[in-house]
Image (spheres, rainbow, N blue to C red):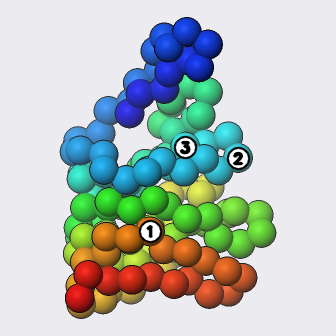
Amino acid sequence: MYCLSTKDGSKVWTYETNGMIKSTACVIHDALVFGSYDKMLHCVALETGELRFRSPPFNGNITTEAIPVYEDQSCVIVTSLSGEVGLVEMSGGTILKKRQFDGPFFSTPVSKEDLVIVATGT
């Protein structure tokens, strides 16, 4: 992951995972959250790229954008290629809930109030 300056294109910081990053990053407050092919959700400080947390591993690679839920954006929903949907706490990366589905997820979930909508590949 690279953070670049919009003023001159210079590199501000970099962050490495143990796998490819194919998910879109999501900005939540002063943090950047994204999934990786190392099967973890990563959260870094937006200004410095310093690691805030890595979630416990999912069974599959995380390829979709993490979606904030709740008014205070205290949690994110994330999906994986192994068919998991997880609710991850932003304060430390704890997986609060996880549900297994039959097919992989390729699309980003959406949320509205107390609902989460996900589309599987099957």
Is residue 30 positioned above or below 68 on the image? above
Please state which of the two labelled residues, at mark 3 or mark 1, is closer to the viewer.
1
Which mark sits nearer the N-terminus, 1 or 2? 2
Is residue 42 positioned above or below 80 on the image? above
Identify the residue under disc 1.
108
Is residue 87 positioned above or below 53 on the image? below
Which mark sits nearer the N-terminus, 3 or 1? 3
Q: Is residue 95 visible?
A: no
Residue farthest to the right, as pictured: 71
Q: Residue at x 56, y 18 (%)?
A: 5
Q: Quadrant of residue 75?
A: bottom right
Q: Is residue 45 visible?
A: yes
Q: Residue at x 55, y 65 (%)?
A: 67
Is residue 85 positioned above or below 11 on the image? below
| Callout 3 touching callout 1 (CB < 8 Å) | no
Secondary element under disc 1, as helix, strand or loop, is loop
Secondary element under disc 2, as helix, strand or loop, is loop
Residue type at tag 1? Thr
Q: Residue at x 68, y 86 (%)?
A: 114
Residue type at tag 2? His
